[in-house]
Amino acid sequence: MVAAASYGLRFDAGRLCLDLVGTVGGGRPGEEPVERLDSPERLRDWLLGSGAVPPGTSLAAVDAAWLGRFRAARDLLHRVVHAEVDGRAAGPDLERVNALAVTAPPALKAARGADGILSRSLVGAPDCGALLGQIARDAVELLTDPAARGQLRRCEGETCSLVYLDTSRGRRRRWCSSEVCGNRERVARHRRRTVGTR
């Protein structure tokens, strides 16, 4: 797998489970997929950036074992989500997602800060299994909601395999992100026209 050095984490798929699925894939045609969860530090960044844990949560416990479990869950969800988009049955993988989803998600509490504003935090230290359960529950909710499932789309970007939730008016969105894949497509189209006119 290609290292993620030049590939940032993405949080524009529209659902927590899809953001995790989007941590692998893309790259140039013919190359190995890009691995965006390539270290425990990147997993910590993903957990905070995706909103899986509240801002300021201590993630000191995140280590190589957590990384391995998150990658395994991500690969499982990748197969299930892509099977659903392709209209194929997920089979035994769906049972594995269900098994992950029975784990209770992390408990949250409201705490008033010195400024008087309420913010959320975890009741205890983050637990790997609870966080994976939270993500699996999000996947179960997504895949069992006919309206949401009908909004699943695969990005049309040449080097992108991201699956996202199309909530645009008219459901005509072609790219996971207009700023990323849409812009790449517009630049490529412009280059093709420029070369054609020379």
Image (cartoon, helix red, strand yellow):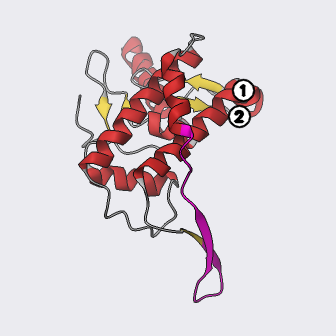
| Number of other residues with Cα within 10 Å of mark 1, as a class: few under 14, some 14 to 19, many 20 or more | few
Residue bearing mark 1:
171
Front residue of 30 and 36: 36
Q: Residue furthest bottom?
A: 114
Which region shows up in magenta?
A: 101-119
Query: Where is the C terminus found, in terms of image quarters?
Result: top left
State the residue at coordinates (36%, 16%). Answer: 195
Front residue of 125 and 67: 125
Q: Are marks 1 and 2 in contact (CB under 8 Å)?
A: yes
Residue 162 drawn at (x, y percent): 48, 29
> Is there any visible trace of residue 13 in the rendered image?
no
User: Quarter-wise, where is residue 28 in the image?
Assistant: top left
Indicate left or right for 187 with 5 as reference: right
State the residue at coordinates (47%, 44%). Answer: 132
Indicate left or right for 71 with 118 as reference: left
Residue 184 drawn at (x, y percent): 43, 30
Residue bearing mark 2:
168
Q: As shown in the figure, which amino acid type bears the numbered disc 1?
A: Arg
User: Quarter-wise, where is residue 76 in the image?
Assistant: top left
